[in-house]
Amino acid sequence: AIQLTQSPSSLSASVGDRVTITCRASQGISSALAWYQQKPGKAPKLLIYDASSLESGVPSRFSGSGSGTDFTLTISSLQPEDFATYYCQQFNSYPPSFGQGTKLEIK
Amino acid sequence: EVQLVESGGGLVQPGRSLRLSCTASGFTFGDYAMSWVRQAPGKGLEWVGFIRSKAYGGTTEYAASVKGRFTISRDDSKSIAYLQMNSLKTEDTAVYYCTRGVRDYDYWGQGTLVTVSS
């Protein structure tokens, strides 16, 4: 099974900051990666699919990049509503797997 | 508007069974694969399994942790996906989410909590 390792596990940042979260796969997964945002008590929300495609309705301050084993999610200018936990997920091979999550907190 | 609504969660003793339902609306249910993802309290996301659309055979895939105990099925006439959970273990305690898709998941239900405890 493919393991996904996110870094950092937690991150403190301020409104307006540029933030980057990394997801590393234990083996190559081409561009078969998605990013989700989850707020407490809520279901995850799809942000990015196919590593770099922005889901409809998601603000353009979110962007994704990478292929193979190394991927990044970037938030260009943090907004108050962006403080949440972020997960990467691979669907290149079975079983689909998620990273352990990155909790983004207000500094 | 696409909506997925899970139901059927609750408290159940170890070794017993429970069936979750996911009622869909706002899209042509039969055209889509449906997946289940769970989240143990305070933990991350774990894929449980999925069922393909009838056009792709309606076949299923499961995580190793639930294979042989859980069964996913669908009733396209009612736009409902089911998760039948047998021989439940305490480690199955989680919020169970119904999601649309098999690669990435563009719509999620609100989740239903399953607590396995004596």
Image (spheres, grey):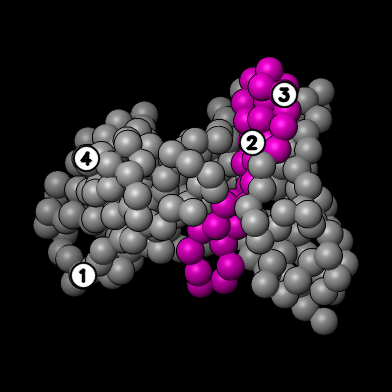
Chain assignment, label 1: A
Report the front residue among B103 and B22.
Answer: B103
- Per the model, the C-alpha gap separating discs 3 and 4 is 34 Å
Chain assignment, label 4: A
Location of residue A21 (image quadrant): bottom left
Which residue lies under the disc numbered 2?
B34
Query: Disc 3 vs disc 4: which is toward the camera?
Result: 3
At a point 75% along the width and 43% down the height, the residue shown is B72
Q: Do the residues labelled 1 and 2 touch (CB within 8 Å)?
A: no
Q: Dot 2, how many residues are within 10 Å of its Cα: few (below 14), some (14-19), or many (20+)?
A: many
- The kind of residue tagged 3 is Gly
- Per the model, the C-alpha gap separating discs 1 and 2 is 35 Å
- Marking on residue A12: 1
At a point 14% along the width and 49% down the height, the residue shown is A77
In the image: residue B41, left or right of residue A88: right
- Per the model, the C-alpha gap separating discs 1 and 3 is 47 Å
Q: Dot 1, how many residues are within 10 Å of its Cα: few (below 14), some (14-19), or many (20+)?
A: few
Magenta span: B31-60
- Per the model, the C-alpha gap separating discs 1 and 4 is 22 Å
Is residue A103 visible to us here?
yes
Which residue lies under the disc numbered 4?
A65
N-terminal of the pair, mark 1 or mark 4, is: 1
At a point 43% along the width and 53% down the height, the residue shown is A2
Is residue A36 visible to us here?
no
- The kind of residue tagged 1 is Ser
Task: Confirm whether the magenta stretch covers residue B58.
Answer: yes
Label 4 secondary element: strand
Query: Disc 1 vs disc 2: which is toward the camera?
Result: 2
